[in-house]
């Protein structure tokens, strides 16, 4: 669904976090133009063997830049910078991941851009926020999100393990989605009031939002803290716990609804109806008092069948459950298929299964388009600005564009 059709975004970003925000806006219908330096393309494009050749971009560049157009522009050249400023004049959003010193050096900071378009939404993403003693420093996913933002500690309890902490996934994509939402909020305010604001988002700030319950409760006594890394299973309720199946897989119960109705229903489905009236487990209070015994009993039950059989049994249960799936299994998940959460996209000589942004409009996530080739739309965009082919050729010979 092209809910942002007609909006124009200048995307002066590199790597993943801020490009992800542009990719989300493009998925929602905005015309997003990704600017790259002729002498130094987006590092994600050439990451781990990727190239600027047609079809040569790294597959992660495809993920974070789907649906955009691409212009190769040398902003260190005054003529290249002037082309950018011409683009600014008709744009709605200026999105950048460039650090403050670079923005000042290139003359593309807030005041510079607003001088050409006072109504533009200026959006900048950083590692740890626009204020404070480290506001001029950069940041990356593993450092600013997982490490500094406390996600690694919540996942692994880094103060009580000999195993070095690491990443469990990419915070860039989640942070980009949040950033895109903030940009849309700013566009709505401009629509209603005429006021254009500067939007700031950061990897660290987004990590803290995602880990809010753990951060808040970290000031409480230990027994009241949430998401304390890997507590003993017996410290968790039987109804919110992980169980190993007969084939060595895992499933998770999340029975947070009607405790009695869901318990009786589960007992019937697992073939143990007598447990519903067992004096140890007949009421919620008794189940809580005998939680450890019930966990061990459930361990025995779920170990009796493979995960595939439990899928059939539990999909009809009243309570919520989920298989602990691999990334590969999500490609075949019926819910992922029905909601088009993964879409096959032709990218050069290969087809990539790209993940859709997790927002739909009228139950439609929209189609994913491939990321642009290096400088693919340079001539097209410059011609739209009124430059003739001779002028474009002159700029190319001078190194202002590519």
Image: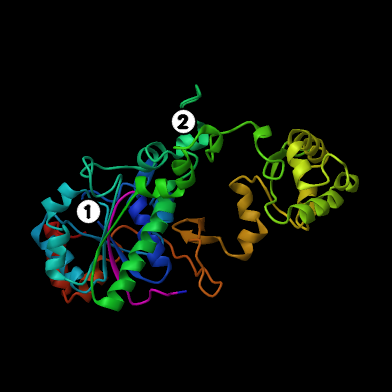
| Residue 227 pos. (x, y %) | 54, 40
Label 1 close to label 2 by CB (< 8 Å): no
Label 1, secondary structure: give it: loop
Give whichever of 272, 94 is nearer the camera. 272
Number of numbered tags placed on the structure image: 2
Give the extent of the magenta segment.
2-15
For disc 2, the marked residue is: 165
Residue drawn 42% across the image and 69% down it: 28
Q: Is residue 351 left or right of residue 97?
A: right
Q: What secondary structure is found at the residue carrying circle 2?
A: loop
Identify the residue shown where x is 53% and y is 41%.
Answer: 226
Colouring scheme, one of rainbow, by chain, secondary structure, one colour = rainbow
Q: Residue, x 20% and y 59% (percent of image)?
A: 73
Q: Residues within 10 Å of mark 1 (few under 14, many from 20)?
A: many
State which quadrant residue 106 falls in: bottom left
Q: Position of residue 363 (x, y in %)?
A: 56, 72
The residue that mark 1 highlights is 37
Characterize the local packing of mark 2: few (<14), some (14-19) or many (20 or more) Cα atoms within 10 angstroms. some
Where residue 237 appears, as percent x and y from the top left, is: 68, 41
In the rendered image, which quarter contains the C terminus? bottom left
- In the displayed image of the protein, which residue is found farthest to the left? 78
């Amino acid at each position: 669904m092209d809910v942002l059709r007609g909006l124009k975004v200048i995307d002066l970003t590199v790597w993943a976090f801020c490009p992800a925000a542009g990719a989300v806006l493009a998925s929602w219908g905005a015309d997003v133009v990704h600017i790259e330096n002729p002498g130094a393309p987006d590092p994600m494009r050439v990451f781990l063997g990727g190239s600027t050749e047609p079809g040569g971009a790294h597959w992660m560049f495809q993920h974070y830049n789907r649906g955009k157009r691409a212009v190769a522009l040398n902003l260190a050249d005054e003529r290249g910078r002037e082309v950018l400023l011409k683009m600014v004049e008709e744009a709605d959003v200026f999105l950048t991941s460039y650090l403050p010193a670079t923005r000042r050096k290139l003359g593309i900071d807030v005041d510079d851009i607003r001088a050409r378009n006072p109504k533009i939404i200026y959006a900048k993403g950083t590692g740890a926020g626009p204020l404070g003693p480290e506001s001029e420093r950069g940041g990356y996913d593993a450092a600013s999100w997982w490490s500094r933002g406390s996600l690694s500690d919540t996942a692994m309890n880094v103060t009580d393990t000999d195993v070095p902490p690491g990443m469990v996934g990419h915070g860039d994509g989640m942070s980009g989605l949040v950033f895109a939402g903030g940009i849309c909020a700013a566009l709505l305010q401009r629509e209603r009031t005429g006021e254009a604001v500067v939007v700031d988002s950061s990897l660290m700030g987004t990590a803290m939002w995602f880990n809010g319950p753990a951060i808040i409760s970290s000031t409480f006594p230990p027994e009241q803290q949430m998401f304390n890394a890997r507590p003993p299973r017996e410290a968790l309720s039987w109804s919110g716990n992980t169980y190993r199946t007969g084939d060595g897989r895992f499933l998770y119960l999340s029975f947070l609804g009607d405790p009695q109705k869901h318990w009786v229903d589960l007992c019937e489905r697992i073939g143990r109806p007598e447990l519903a009236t067992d004096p140890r487990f007949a009421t919620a209070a008794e189940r809580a008092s005998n939680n450890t015994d019930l966990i061990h009993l459930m361990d025995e039950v779920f170990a009796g069948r493979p995960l595939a059989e439990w899928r059939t049994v539990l999909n009809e249960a009243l309570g919520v459950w989920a298989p602990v799936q691999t990334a590969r299994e999500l490609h075949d998940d019926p819910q992922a298929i029905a909601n088009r959460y993964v879409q096959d996209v032709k990218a050069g000589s290969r087809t990539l299964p790209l993940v859709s942004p997790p927002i739909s409009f009228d139950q439609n996530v929209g189609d994913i388009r491939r990321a642009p080739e290096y400088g693919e739309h340079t001539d097209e965009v410059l011609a739209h600005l009124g430059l003739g082919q001779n002028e474009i050729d002159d700029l190319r010979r001078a190194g202002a564009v590519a």
